[in-house]
Amino acid sequence: MGRRRRFLLVVDFEQIVQDALDSLPAELRDQISNVEIVVNDEPPRGQPLLGLYQGVPLTRRGISYSGALPDKITIYRGPLERLYGYDPELLSKQIRHVVLHEVAHHFGISDERLIEIDRY
């Protein structure tokens, strides 16, 4: 009995991230403010992450919010490719899910609320 091999299939990772953002309704896309979206190869050592939002959610920005450095959404290519890279359709779906999950945090939606509405 031979060992089962997993082959990583090539997808345009950055384009899938952009397509996920473009899939948002225009009224939501227009509200995304002061946020940079980047793709990194790996999360910080010891952190099992697929994506990460860092910043001040829109719902917590007050009148004094100005001149702040951009928030940052990071999507981690390595873990996503290791988990789902054997199936380009599944990989694309999971990249999109992670992007939208992190954008939800930018809008102030917590993990608990995402679980509640079955979007985690």
Image: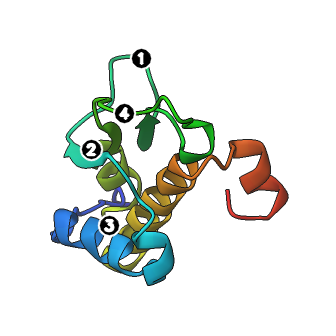
- Comparing 44 with 102, the one in front is 102
Crowd tier of the residue under label 3, counting other residues whose Cα lies within 10 Å: few below 14, some 14–19, many 20 or above:
some
Q: Which residue is mark 4?
A: 66
Q: Amino acid at mark 3?
A: Tyr
Q: Which residue is mark 1?
A: 46
Query: Which mark is on residue 77?
Result: none
Q: Quadrant of residue 65?
A: top left
Count of labels in the image = 4
Q: In the image, is 77 to the left or to the right of 32?
A: left
Do labels 4 and 1 touch, CB within 8 Å? no
Q: Which residue is mark 3?
A: 86
Front: mark 4 or 3: 4
Q: Amino acid at mark 4?
A: Ser
Question: Which numbered disc flags the more N-terminal residue, 4 or 1?
Answer: 1
**Residue at image location 23% in from the left, 63% down from the top:** 7
Do labels 4 and 2 touch, CB within 8 Å? no
Q: Amino acid at mark 2?
A: Gly
Q: Position of residue 63 (x, y in %)?
A: 53, 35
Distance Cα–Cα, label 4 vs label 1 = 34 Å
Distance Cα–Cα, label 4 vs label 2 = 34 Å
Q: Amino acid at mark 1?
A: Gly
Q: Specify the farthest residue to the right.
A: 116
Q: Quadrant of residue 69?
A: top left
**Residue at image location 26% in from the left, 70% down from the top:** 18
Q: Position of residue 29 (x, y in %)?
A: 41, 71
Helix, strand, or loop for circle 2? helix
Helix, strand, or loop for circle 4? loop
Do labels 2 and 3 touch, CB within 8 Å? no
Front: mark 4 or 2: 4
Crowd tier of the residue under label 4, counting other residues whose Cα lies within 10 Å: few below 14, some 14–19, many 20 or above:
few
Question: Which numbered disc flags the more N-terminal residue, 2 or 1?
Answer: 1
Query: Which mark is on residue 78?
Result: 2
